Image (cartoon, rainbow, N blue to C red):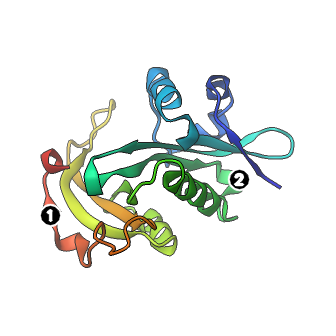
Amino acid sequence: MTSLKPFHATDLFRVNDVNLDVLTENYHIPFYLSYLAEWPTLFFSSESPNGDITGYMMGKAEGKGKNWHSHVTCLSVSSSYRRLGLADVLVDNLERRSEQPYDAYFVDLFVRSSNALAIGMYKKFGYSVYRRVVGYYSGGSAMGGSLDEEDAFEMRKALRRDVKKESIRENGEEFRVSPLEV
């Protein structure tokens, strides 16, 4: 049985099994610590009975007025704990924490437009594409890879505060914006 725990700074030394994966976005330690300092209730981990970190969620709250929302910055689950429903548990927990105490209108996230697996997973969780951000991700690598850009889908899920569901739209894949408009 996995349990959810607040993320602590020392957990950064325990997440290697989760972060050493091509599907996980990695950040510099100061980035993680800034989230931990500013949004501690939106940064949490899941642990196995033996204390191994099996996944984590890193989120933040931002915006103004009806754009006040929480954002999924990083959701990662260890490869040996995938397809067990853990991502759903982590996302659901972020949504509940977004409603109380943050009183957010919606939760959003960005995903590569080519990442059909993640898009399908988030759709299963009730998210929909709000808009396509053209050229949001730039390719390339330290090994001299292509510098091609890739679009992102901003996906959203309306929360209880958004009674009229104004934070979501149909056919968001066709609604194109530049990264400067996000």
In the image, 166 versus 112, the foreground residue is 166
Q: How busy is the neighbourhood of tag 1: few (under 14 within 10 Å), some, or many (20 plus)?
A: some
Residue that label 1 marks: 176
Residue 24 image point, x, y percent: 50, 44
Residue 97: x and y, percent? 55, 51
Q: Is any part of residue 20 visible from this angle?
A: no
Where does label 2 land, which residue? 80
Q: Residue 104: image x %, image y %?
A: 41, 55
Which quadrant, please, contains the N terminus?
A: bottom right
Q: Position of residue 118 (x, y in %)?
A: 46, 63
The reply, left or right, for residue 65 in relation to residue 81 is left
Residue type, numbered disc 1 = Arg
Q: Nearer the viewer, residue 149 or 121?
A: 121
Between residue 78 and residue 130, name the one nearer to us: 130
In the rendered structure, which amino acid carries the disc numbered 2?
A: Ser
Say which residue appears at 49% left-offset and 49% top-offset. Answer: 23
Q: Secondary structure at mark 2?
A: helix
Rendered position, 64 above or below 151: above
The reply, left or right, for residue 46 in relation to residue 145 is right
Label 1 with label 2: CB-CB less than 8 Å: no
Q: Residues within 10 Å of mark 2 (few under 14, many from 20)?
A: few
**From what the image shows, is residue 143 above or below residue 163?**
above
Q: Secondary structure at mark 1?
A: strand
Taking the spot 81% from the left edge, 38% from the top edge, the residue there is 51
Q: Is residue 150 visible?
A: yes
